[in-house]
Each structure stands twice: as structure tokens, then as C-alpha cells.
Amino acid sequence: MIYAKNSDALTYRGIHPNLDMALERITKEFLSSVGEERVEIKGSDVYATRFTYETIPEEESFFEAHRNYLDIHLMLEGSERVEIAPPETLTEFDRVEANDFYAYRGEGQYRLVLSPGDFLVVFPNDAHKIKMRVDGPETVTKAVFKVRIK
């Protein structure tokens, strides 16, 4: 997991070439061009999409993880709570292997608030529980990069 400010994104280059491509696009100019339709940077290996939704109560959220991709979550408007836990400490209840999606229930080990100007990189060993309310319901907008690393 990497939790940092957008302005520090380039300091994390060198972990994986596909991650570098995404980190280099954490700019106001690129993020303003990302819409609800997927923006491909390197085909299905690196792409970004914008999402707008209402935050939900913690009990309505669940953990998700991926095995082939990492995610970069960038909050553009609003704030949400996020929890992180290793998948092996959780109970799997659903999977769609074709979409690299694994769903879990359980307790988080790390808690944070994602706000505008922040980004969060979750690797395959970082199950993440997102969309949770901070103080009450809120409309949030964020960009999510999907980055194939396997």
C-alpha cells in the first residue's frame, strides 16, 4: 500500500513500468480528461476511469482485492473512509476470476481517509474496503487507475 499526496506521485517510480505510466499521469491536466468511459493509457494494461457515487455505511461495504492488477485511487471531490487488510486474514465470499475480482468480509488492519489531493495504491496483497462515509453521506468523485503488474 502507498498512501501519499498527488504531488509526491513521481517519487514512487521504479516499482513497475506500468505503475510508472500511471504515476506520471497524476496531473490536473490528465485527471480532468478522465471521464466515466475508460481512458486507455496502455490498452488493458494501464487505464483510468472516473466514478461518482454516494458514500455508504461501513456495514454495506466489503473488501475487494485483485491478483493481476493494482489500483490507484485518487479522490477528486469529497472524502471517503478506506480500510486495508491482507486477503489471507479475511473470508472470501465471491470471485470473478475473469475480472480479477475477489470479495471478502472481515476486519481491516489499516484505516485512512482519502480526500482531494490524496492517492492510494493498493497492491494484490492489499484487500481494500472503499466508499465508506466519513461523517455522513457524501457525494464523491474519484479517478481509479487499473495497472496490470502480473
Image (cartoon, grey):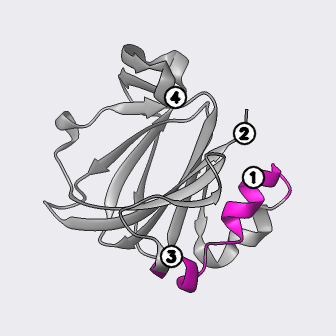
Label 1 sits on residue: 18
- Residue placed furthest toward the left: 137
- State which tag comes first along the sequence, 3 or 2: 3
- State which tag comes first along the sequence, 4 or 2: 4
Q: Between marks 4 and 2, how big is the CA–CA gap? A: 12 Å
Kindly identify the residue that appears in the image at 35 percent across and 46 percent down.
Answer: 130
Give amino acid for label 4. Answer: Asp
Label 2 sits on residue: 149
- Which SS class for mark 3? helix
Q: Between marks 4 and 3, how big is the CA–CA gap? A: 24 Å
Instruction: Determine which of the numbered discs, if any, sits on residue 33 in the image.
Output: none
Label 3 sits on residue: 31
Q: Are marks 4 and 3 in contact (CB under 8 Å)?
A: no
Q: Looking at the image, is 126 positioned above or below residue 89?
A: below
- Which SS class for mark 1? helix
Kindly identify the residue that appears in the image at 16 percent across and 45 percent down.
Answer: 57
- State which tag comes first along the sequence, 3 or 1: 1
Label 4 sits on residue: 100
Q: Is 108 left or right of 28, judged from the image as shown?
A: left
- Does 24 appear in magenta? yes
Answer with the quarter of the image where residue 7 lies: bottom right
Instruction: Give the magenta-colored segment's residue range.
Output: 14-32
From the top left corner, tell me how far across and down residue 54 is, in percent.
18, 58
Q: Between marks 1 and 4, how big is the CA–CA gap? A: 17 Å
- State which tag comes first along the sequence, 1 or 4: 1
- State which tag comes first along the sequence, 2 or 1: 1
Answer with the quarter of the image where residue 88 lies: top right
From the top left corner, tell me how far across and down residue 146 is, in percent.
56, 49
Q: Between marks 3 and 2, how big is the CA–CA gap? A: 22 Å
Q: Between marks 3 and 1, how big is the CA–CA gap? A: 17 Å
